[in-house]
Amino acid sequence: MKRLLRATGAGVAALLTTLLTAPAVQADNSFLGLDFGQSDLLDDVGDFWTEVSDDFRVKLGVGTSVAPRFEGSDNYRVRVMPKFSVRYKNIVALNNTRIRVFIIHNDKFVTGMQARYRFGRDEDASPDLLGLGNVSDSFELGGFAEWRPGWAIVGVEVGRDVAGGHDGLLAAVYAGSQYSLGGGFYLQGGAQVTWASGNFMGRNFGVTEAQSIASGLPEFDAGSGIKDVAARIGVRFNRWKNWDFNTYVAYSRLMSDASGSPLVELRGSPNQLMWSISGQYKF
């Protein structure tokens, strides 16, 4: 056991060293968290009930993933990213780039307000984006609700950008659950459907006349609709008091005008895959 703990600690230290010594990345800041099918939303499904704390609870760690360079890309890259969360009682929780305030809650239902920072997209992140310009970072304000009818968690969230990034509205319906395999191992799974407004779709998947001339892609007016359908399955190891490890694979299928965008049809793919592994230490 001690050898395993030492090996685990050494692995986390190596990841931290890689993170701290890595060269500066491009301005899309995607190494901090990837909005691929909003799969990150499923990272903390049901945390209100499973991560209860009488006071402050802090988790710090690192993770690595293999994922598309941008949403709709068929070119993949490896990322190293910090992982962190802070929880204060049944009042507020910060998880990476999203903060939630719990207003109404009991053993079956929780709802409240949330704010989320969403990284934009830099055209220098991929040759496929040249001529399309940058999509600025956004700050979304909205709310959420989760219901725990029994073995599963069902939830909904909505958020609107107030920082002029994508300047749109996103809404998602999701469900997740986990099953104990024994020995500290848990099988986890989840699925999600995300709807996006015309502003979000236009900024991320549309091609204006000027962009068409600069990029060589045909003009495309992207409207509101279902942005994607996503699912993930993974394993969590939580046998030791202070350590928490997760690994999962996720698949997202772009839909409606997201999949019909010439950026996706001609230079990318509507099929998006991601693999991730991470470890966190609980203080």
Image (tube, rainbow, N blue to C red):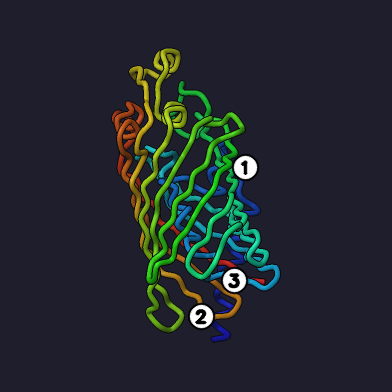
Q: Nearer the viewer, residue 63 or 193?
A: 193
The alpha-carbon separation of the residues under discs 3 and 2 comes to 17 Å
Left/right of residue 9 with respect to residue 203 in the rendered view: right
Tell me what residue is drawn at x 38 percent, y 58 percent.
175
Write the residue at 46% across / 80% down: 184
For discs 1 and 2, the disc positioned in front in the rendered view: 2
**Helix, strand or loop under label 2:** loop
Q: Measuring 33% from the left and 46% from the top, which residue is drawn there?
A: 229
Expressed as whole percent of the image width and height from the top left, the position of residue 54 reads 67, 73
Disc number for residue 239: 2
- Quadrant the N terminus occupies: bottom right
The answer to which of marks 3 and 1 sits earlier in the sequence is 1
Q: Amino acid at mark 1?
A: Ala
Q: Amino acid at mark 3?
A: Val
Question: Which residue, given by chain and number where applicable, does mark 1 sit on?
Answer: 24
- First in sequence: mark 1 or mark 2? 1
Residue 17 lies in quadrant: bottom right
Task: List x then y, in percent, for residue 22.
Answer: 61, 49
Q: Residues within 10 Å of mark 3 (few under 14, many from 20)?
A: some
Whether residue 56 is visible, yes or no, is yes
Please tell me whether residue 16 is drawn above or below residue 8 in the rendered image.
above
For marks 3 and 2, the one nearer the N-term is: 3
Q: Is residue 228 left or right of residue 164?
A: left
Name the residue type under label 2. Arg
Give residue 190's quadrant in the image: bottom left
Q: Are marks 3 and 2 in contact (CB under 8 Å)?
A: no
Q: Which mark is residue 236?
A: none
Quarter occupied by the C terminus: bottom right
Which residue is outermost to the right? 55
SS under mark 3:
loop
Q: CA distance from mark 1 to mark 2?
A: 36 Å
Residue 52: image tag: 3
